[in-house]
Image: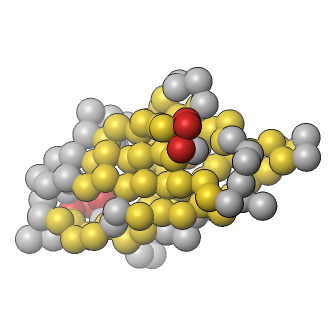
Amino acid sequence: QVQLVESGGGLVQPGGSLRLSCAASGTLYRFNAMTWYRQAPGEQRALVGGITRVGIRNYADSVKGRFTISSDNAKNTVFLQMNNLKPEDTAVYYCRGLFIVYFILQVYWGQGAQVTVAS
C-alpha cells in the first residue's frame, strides 16, 4: 500500500554535499513522520534524524549543523541534505515512514541508498 523510494546516493569527496530523497509512491496515505537511519558496514543501524508532518525535526548529535531534513508534503517526499560530509558518514541510508493505514499506525522502509565519502 505504501512504497518508499529513495534516490540521490553516490560517491562524494570529504567536505562535499549530497541530497537524498524519500518519496512515498502509489498511495494516497500521507506520512505522519519520516525518519532517516544509516548503517555502516559491521555496525548497527543508527538514527540520523527525522521530521513530522507539521515540521518538527530532530537530529543525531553527529550530524547536527551539517545535515538538514525537509519535506514536501504535497509530494509526500522527504529530503536529507548532507553538507560537509566526512568519511565516517559513509553508510547505507534508509528512510522509515510512519503512516496511518486503515486507522492503524504502520511502518514502511525505503530500499536504502549508498553514500560513500572518500577522496
Q: Closest to the observer: 20 or 48?
A: 20
Q: Report whether 82 appears left or right of 118.
A: right
Q: Residue at x 71, y 54 (%)?
A: 27
Give the percent coordinates (x, y) of residue 28: 73, 48
Q: Residue at x 28, y 70 (%)?
A: 10
Q: Report whether 75 appears left or right of 80.
A: right
Q: Residue at x 54, y 64 (%)?
A: 5
Quadrant position of residue 59 = top left
Q: Report whether 26 appears left or right of 38.
A: right
Q: Residue at x 43, y 54 (%)?
A: 21
Observer able to see residue 15: yes
- Quarter of the image with the C terminus is bottom left
Give the percent coordinates (x, y) of residue 26: 68, 60
In the displayed structure, would residue 16 be above or below residue 119?
Answer: above
In the displayed structure, would residue 43 be above or below residue 95?
Answer: below
Looking at the picture, the colour scheme in use is secondary structure
Give the percent coordinates (x, y) of residue 71: 47, 37
In the displayed structure, would residue 98 be above or below residue 109?
Answer: above
* Name of the residue lying farthest toward the left: 119
Give the percent coordinates (x, y) of residue 4: 60, 60
- Quarter of the image with the N terminus is bottom right
Observer able to see residue 44: no
Number of marks? 0
Q: Report whether 26 appears left or right of 18.
A: right
Q: Closest to the observer: 61 or 38?
A: 38
